Image (spheres, rainbow, N blue to C red):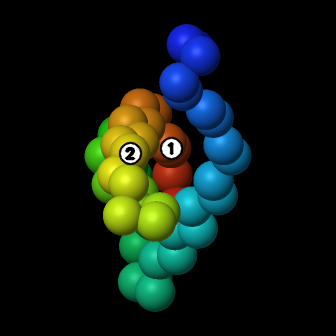
């Protein structure tokens, strides 16, 4: 992290309304706060019941 960077913790809730389990291998999200955009890349999220 450099002088002009900052970090934060964000929680993402994934729900599955289907009776079958959902396997997620990875995901990519864009987070926008005060007209500033950041990206979040997740790998190996697992199984959502």
Q: CA distance from mark 2 to mark 1?
A: 23 Å
Q: Can you identify the residue that label 2 sits on?
A: 38
Using the image, determine if residue 3 lies above or below residue 15: above
Horizontal arrangement in the rendering, residue 18 relative to residue 5 (left or right): left
Sequence-first tag of 2 and 1: 2
Extreme right residue here?
A: 9
Indicate the secondary structure of the residue bearing disc 2: strand
Q: Which quadrant of the figure has residue 35?
A: bottom left
Tell me the residue at 68%/46% (across/down).
9
Using the image, determine if residue 9 lies above or below residue 7: below
Who is closer to the viewer here, 10 or 12?
10
Who is closer to the viewer here, 17 or 12?
12
Tell me the residue at 47%/63% (across/down).
33
Tell me the residue at 53%/24% (across/down).
4
Q: Could you tell me if the residues under marks 2 and 1 are in contact, i.e. CB atoms within 8 Å?
A: no
Picture coordinates of residue 41, whole percent (x, y): 38, 37
The dot on residue 26 is none
Work out which quarter of the rendered image holds the N terminus and state it.
Answer: top right
Indicate the secondary structure of the residue bearing disc 1: strand
Can the viewer see residue 42?
yes
């Amino acid at each position: 992290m450099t002088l002009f960077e900052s970090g934060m913790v964000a929680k993402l809730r994934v729900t599955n309304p289907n009776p079958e389990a959902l396997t997620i291998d990875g995901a990519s999200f864009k987070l926008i706060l005060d007209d500033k955009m950041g990206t979040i890349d997740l790998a190996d999220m697992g199984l959502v019941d």
